[in-house]
Amino acid sequence: MRKVAVIGVGQSNFGELWDASFRDIVLSAGIEALEDAGLEGREIEAMYVGNMSGGRYLAQEHIAALIADYAGLAELHIPSTRVEAADASGGLALRQAYMAVASGVHDIVIAAGAEKVTDVGSEAAMEILASAADREWEVFAGATLASLYAMIARLHMEKFGTRPEDLAMVSVKNHKNATLNPKAQFRREISLEIALNSPYVAEPLRLFDCAPLSDGAAVVILASEEVAKTYTDTPVYISACCQASDYLALHSRKDLLTMRAVVHAAKQAYKQAGIEAKDIDVAEVHDSFTIAEILAYEDLGFAEKGKGAELIREGVTNLDGDIPVNPSGGLKACGHAVGATGIRQAVEITLQLRGDAGKRQVDAENGLALNVGGTGATAIVTIFTR
Amino acid sequence: MLPRFWRKIKYRYDLVGTKCENCGNYYYPPRNLCPVCRRKSKIREVKLSGRGEVISYSIVHEAPEDLKAEKPYVIALIRLDEGPLVTSQLVCEPEEVKIGMRVRKAFRKYGEDGEAGIIYYGTKFVLDEV
Amino acid sequence: MIGIVSYGTYVPKYRIKAEEIARIWGENGEVISKGLGIQQKSVPYLDEDTATIAVEAAREAVYRARIDGSEIGAVYVGSESHPYVVKPTATIVGEAIGAGNEYFAADLEFACKAGTAGMQICLAMVKAGMINYGLAIGADTSQGAPGDPLEYSASAGGAAYIIGEKNVIAEIEATCSFTSDTPDFWRREGQPYPSHGGRFTGLPAYFRHITSAAKLIMEKTGLQPSDFKYAVFHQPNGKFPMRAAKMLGFNSEQVKQGLVVSCIGNTYSGSSLLGLAAVLDVAKPEDRILLVSFGSGAGSDAFVIRATDAIESFERKPEVWEKIKSGVCVDYGLYLKFRRKIKVR
C-alpha cells in the first residue's frame, strides 16, 4: 500500500445558491482544485463522486458521468463513479479515491462531493433527507431525522446530565468559527440566549441545534506520494481512511448513545495511522445536530462516554482550545451540502495542515475528519498528517 | 407505495414479528435473517404482546406534510416486553409522556395517499392505563 | 343454543359539550342539552375512523372470547361512515384480527341498524352450520352538518359481537325485523352531510318501526315488558328511547343502564350495540334483554336476549360506562380540526 497525499483542494460557497445550478457549483469547486494542484486536467485518471440524491433533488441520475462531462474530462474517458451513503456520501468518495491510489491502481484521482437541495423547496428537501433513516419503519412511523437525534439527545441528558446549554454552546462555537470562513453559509455570531430561545424543531432540539440543508460542492485531488512530490512541497498525507457500518435504524442499534460505526472506524484509523485520540490536533466532525458533535467527542475518544459535554463547557474544542473542532463552522454554520460535506471536511483539514486556513488557522500536525450517514449507520474517519 | 405497503400489512396492522429459534432473539420490525446467527438463523413468525415501555421520546414541532395537522406529536422509542425496540408515534398529550411509562398497541390511521388514494393503517401506541 | 359468545367496544377519548356547540351557533346550550338528553358527544381524533374503531372493538371481543382470530368464519361491518365507499372495512378488520383468508365478509349499510343486521346474518350462518363464529360490528364516525341540530348528537364509537354456539354468554332466543321504505333521513352519493325530514323522523319513522318490531317479537315469543330486566333501544338522543319505552309499557329503570347517549351522543351503527354492551356488563344469568335497533330508511331489528350462567365468568372489564365516563373535552375549534371540517390546501 502506497502513501496517499492531497495535492489540491477546492470548494464552492455553501448556502442557498439560487443563481448556480448543480453543474455550476461542481465546476467552480473543480476548477479551484485543479488550480490549487497546478494540474491541467488531463492528468486525472479517475473520479469518485459523493452525491446523496441527484435523483430526487434534481430528477437526475448518472451523476458521475454528468460531473466528469461538465468538468471537461469527457474527452479523457476516465472511470467516474458515484457513491452514496446519505450524508456520508462525501466520505465514501474520499475513501474510494484513497483506496484507488493506495492500491496502485491509479496515481492521480479526484474525490468530489456535490449536492443541490434548493431547487425542490425546503419541505421536500427535508423529506428527501429523511431517506437517510429507515423509510419503512422510522420515517413511515412519523420520525424525522431531527426527532431521531432528539431522542438520542434526551437520553444523553437523562443518563449523563448533558444540558440544553451544552448543546447550544456547540452551536455558538461553530457560528463564531464560521465568521472567519469566507465560504460558510452563516457568517454571524449567535448568542447562547438566542440559541436557547429558538423555537423547538423536535424537543429537546431547537432551531439552532440543527444544521441547515445547503447547496455546495467540494473537491480534493489525491495522488501517490511519489507523484505528489512533483506537484507540491506541502503534501498533506492521508495516514488512514477507515469506514464502518451499523444497523440502519436507530431502534436496531445496540447502544443508543454510542455510534458504534464511528468507534469502529476511529479505532481502525488510529491504529493504521499509528497514533491515539490525544494526538489529534484539529478535527472536523459531523454536527448535523449539536448532540452529534457531543457524541463525536466521545466516540472518537476525545472524551469518555458521557463526558462529551465537559469539553464544550471547558472550551477545549474552541478555536483557541486544546483540540479545535469544526474550525470551518461545521455543518451547522458552514452549511451541510449533504453529499459534499465529507469532502468539504477534507478540504478544511488539508488547509489547516498546510497553514492555509487564513484567520481560522490553528496549529496542527494531525487532523481528523468524521463523516456520518443518517443517525450513524455509516461512518468514515480520515486522519491527515503533515 | 401500494404494493410496498400491502406487502407488509400483516406486520403493520398488528405487532407480528419474528423470532430466531437458534438464539432466542425477537425481532420487530420482522427480520428474515437473524443478524446474530446469520446462516444459522431459525426464523419463525410470532405475534408480540403489544405492550412495552418508553425508552426515549421527542415532541415533534416541525412536522412532515402529512403529519402537519397533528403537530406537536410524540415520537418514541418503545421497548416491547419481548425485547425489540420500535420507533412509533405515541398518541397522547405531549405533557403526559415520561421515560419509563408503560404503553400498549393501538390500531390507527397513519395517513393516506391523497384524498383519492388508499388509506394507510398501522400500529401506534397509547398509554397503558392498567 | 346460539347467541353472543363475546363482545368488545371502543369509544374515542375526546368529548365536546353540547353547551360548547351551542355557544358557537348562538343557541341556548342548557335548554338544548336538557331537551335532547345529551350532555356531550364523543369526537374521534385525526388518526381514527370507522375502521380503527371497528378493529379496536373487534380485538377486544376476540381477546375476551379467548379464541384465535382465524376461528372467525364471517366478518360483517355495518356503518354509514365507512372510510371507503368502495373497498370494504370488513377486510381491514379481518386482516387486523388475523382472520386468515377463509372467511365470509361484506360491509353493510342500513343507517343506524347496519350493526344489528350483521348480527342477524351471523346468527343465521351459525344456525345453518356454515360458520363456527361470526363477527358483527356496528361502528361510525358520523358527521353532523355544522349548525344543524344533528351536530349535537352525531358522534363516534363502535361495538363488536361474536356470535356462535360454544360458550354462549347470552342466548339470542329470537329475532325479527320490521322494515318499510320510509325516507326519514338519508345521504346522497357525494354529499358530505346527511339530510333529514325534521319532525318526520319521529312518529312515522323511529317510533313506528321500533314499536312495531318490539310488538312483533313479543307476539312471536309470547313475552311481556315485565318479562324483561332490560330494554335497549336505538338512541338518537336521550328522549326518544324513553318515549318508545313508555309507548311499549317499559319503565325507565329498564332503559337506564343502556342509555349511553347522554355521555357520548349517537354513535349511529354503534348506538344500540353499545347500549347492549353496557347492559351485558352488569347482566346476571337468566336476565332477559330486549334489544331494538332503528335504521333510517327505515327498519328495526328486534332481539330477545337471555344472559346465561357463562356470563359470570366472562371478562367484562373495563365496562362501557367506565370507558365513556372518562374523556377529554375539546373546544369547537379543535373539534373542527379533528373532524377535518377545516379546508386546508
Image: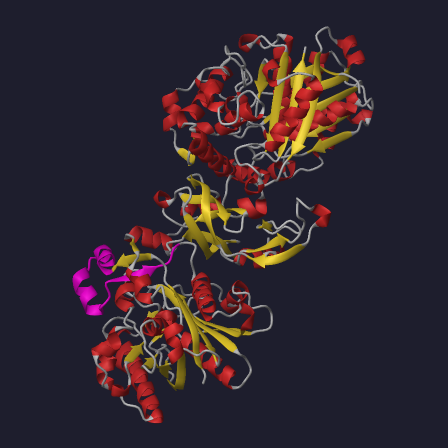
Q: Report x, y in % for residue C344.
A: 41, 49
Residue C6 image position (x, y, % from top left): 43, 73
Q: Is residue B106 or residue C112 the one in the foreground?
A: B106
Q: Is residue B13 visible?
A: yes
Q: Residue A179 vs residue A115: left or right?
A: left
Mark yes or no: residue A21 visible. no
- Compared with residue A159, is residue B130 higher up or lower down, i.e. above or below? below
- Residue at 71% x, 20% y: name it: A272
Residue C322 screen position, x and y as percent: 31, 63
Of the 4 image quadrants, the one containing the N terminus of chain C is bottom left
Q: How many marks?
A: 0
Magenta residues (range): C18-45
Q: Residue at x 62, y 7 (%)?
A: A355
Asked if residue C31 lies left or right of residue C185, the reply is left
For the residue pair B44 and B15, the one nearer the viewer reads as B44
Rendered view: C118 above or below C100: below
- Report the residue that reaches farthest toward the top: A233
Q: Quadrant of residue A378?
A: top right
Of residues A122 and A311, which is closer to you in this image?
A311
Q: Would residue A154 be found to the left or right of residue A41 on screen?
A: left
Location of residue A5 by image quarter: top right
* Rendering colour mode: secondary structure
Q: Is residue C40 magenta?
A: yes
Whether residue C292 is in magenta: the answer is no
**Rendered position, A8 above or below C215:** above
Residue depicted at x 23% and y 57%: C25
Percent x, y for residue A195? 40, 25
